Amino acid sequence: MFGVHDAFTLIRRATELLPEHARAENGALPDDVRDCQRAGDWELALDLLLRIGESHPVPVDFWRMLTESARQLRLTDTAAWCVLRDHETRHGTVRARLSLLPTSEGGRRTPVPGDGRLRPLWNIGNRAPGSERPLNVAGLWSEGLAELPPGHSATVRLAPLSPEQWRHLAAGDAITMHESRPPVGVARIIEVTSAAVSGHR
C-alpha cells in the first residue's frame, strides 16, 4: 500500500497524522520527531513515533506507515510490533497471561518466539455442530520477552485471525493453546478491548 514511498517520506507522513498535543509517556512530542528528522536520525524518529502511538489514539494508516518504514530500515522487531499494533487498532486488543506446559508434561520442546511468527490454535470456548470444540487461530506476541521457554509464563498479546469470534471473552476467562489436539499451554485473559478506530483518517 505504501511501497511506492521511501521510509523517510512515510515517517514524515506518519508524523503529520498526529495532533500537536500528542505526547508519549516519556514526554516526546511530534516536534521532537521533526527534530530527529532534520538531524537525519530516522531510527530515533521512528522509535519516538512508536512511543507516541502507544500513548495516543492514532488512525489506522499510522501503524501501516510505521510497519513499512521499519521494514525498509531493516528493523525487523520494530516492524513485527507495528504489525500487531495495526491489528489491535483495527480489531481490538486481547492480552493474557500464558503458562506453557513443561516438556515433561506434553508441552513444547522449544521456546515460543515472542515476535508474532507463531500462530497457534486456541480453544476459546466456541461451539460447533458435533462433539469437538473448534479451535481458533491467533498470532502471539510476548510482552518484553524475545521467547518463552516451555514451563514458563509471560504476558502475551494475541492477534486473532477471526477477531469477531473472540468478542465473548472477558478478563478472567481461561483459554488453551494447541499445536495439535492436546494443549501445550493455558492462558488467563487479562484484557479485551474493542477497536481503537473505525476507519481511516
Image (cartoon, rainbow, N blue to C red):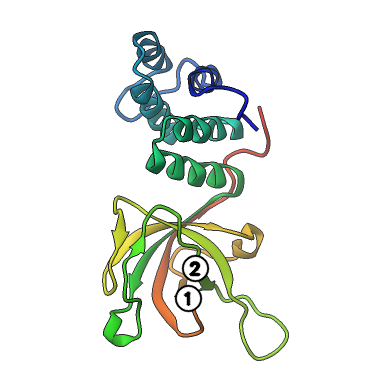
Q: Residues under labels 2 and 1: Cα distance?
A: 6 Å
Q: Residue furthest right?
A: 129
Rendering coords of residue 23 (x, y %): 40, 23
Which badge, 2 or 1, is on the more N-terminal residue? 2
**Residue 100 position within the rendered picture, expressed as x and y whole percent measured from the top left:** 33, 73
- Tell me what residue is drawn at x 54 percent, y 30 percent: 65
Residue bearing mark 1: 179
**Count of labels in the image:** 2
From the viewer's perspective, tell me whether residue 95 is left or right of residue 60: left
Front residue of this view, candidates 32 and 11: 11
Q: Which mark is residue 188?
A: none
Taking 21 as reference, is 198 left or right?
right
Amino acid beneath label 2: Pro
Residue placed farthest to the bottom in the image? 131
Considering only vertical position in the picture, is 189 above or below 57?
A: below
Measuring 31% from the left and 59% from the top, which residue is drawn there? 147
Does 97 appear above or below 107? above
Q: Which SS class for mark 1?
A: loop
CB-based contact (under 8 Å), mark 2 and mark 1: yes
Instruction: Check the picture and name the quadrant holding the N terminus.
Output: top right
- Rendered location of residue 176, percent (x, y): 46, 75
Secondary structure of the residue carrying numbered label 2: loop
Please, which residue is most extreme toward the top here? 38
Residue 49, located in which quarter of the rendered image? Answer: top left
Mark 1 crowd level (few <14, some 14–19, many ≥20, 10 Å Cα): some
Quadrant of the drawing holding the C terminus: top right
Instruction: Please give the residue where the numbered disc 2 appears in the rendered image.
Output: 120
**Kind of residue indicated by mark 1:** Glu
**Residue visible at 45% across and 40% down in the picture:** 79
